[in-house]
Image: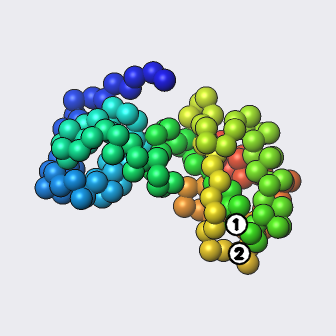
Amino acid sequence: MANIKISEQKVLQIEAICKEFNNEKGELINVLHKTQSLVGYLPAEVQEIISKNLNCSVAHVYGVVTFYSFFTMIPKGQFPISICMGTACYVRGAEKVLDEFKRILNVPVGQTTPDGKFSLSCLRCVGACGLAPVVMVGEKVYGRVSPDGVKDIIKEYKQA
């Protein structure tokens, strides 16, 4: 994996986030949330900055980042696409919808398209079971999505 160069300005912003939480190790999750909002993801270089400022091991920071599914070490696309794989969605064909997204975008789950536009992920339940199967693009929810509807969802964002 290639090293990511973090700009001096970003380093200062990350250090400011740590300071905002008094550089307390017990605030690690809050620091990670706020940092991921700033940077978009949590590569090793960012984790090292946080570990130094909170005076905890990089292994501890990495353990928290990899334990919670909200955190990501891979940059997300401009339009993150999440397919719900909860029971209701799965029973109503979410897997076929996912397969169609993978086919059209030519990208596996957990990855981002080479142009950086789309990333693909699965999640457990968005709480919209009556609309199953459900797809989210960013914060926008699409209900009763069929494999045939996938191309229209993608087309809506391709022009952006």
As drawn, 51 above or below 135: above
- Give the quarter of the image for residue 77: top right
Q: Residues within 10 Å of mark 2 (few under 14, many from 20)?
A: some
The percent position of residue 146, horizontal first and vertical second, equals: 83, 59
Which residue is rendered at x = 76% and y = 71% of the image? 88
Instruction: Inspect this view and state whether residue 39 appears.
Output: no
Which marked residue is nearer to the observer: mark 1 or mark 2?
A: 1
Element marked by disc 2: helix
The percent position of residue 131, horizontal first and vertical second, equals: 73, 73
Upstream in sequence: badge 1 or badge 2: 1
The percent position of residue 114, horizontal first and vertical second, equals: 61, 29
Q: Residue 86 carries which label?
A: 1
Q: Residue 61 carries which label?
A: none
- Give the quarter of the image for residue 84: bottom right
In the rendered view, does 119 fall on the left or right side of 69? right
Instruction: Inspect this view and state whether residue 109 appears.
Output: yes
Q: Which mark is residue 129?
A: 2
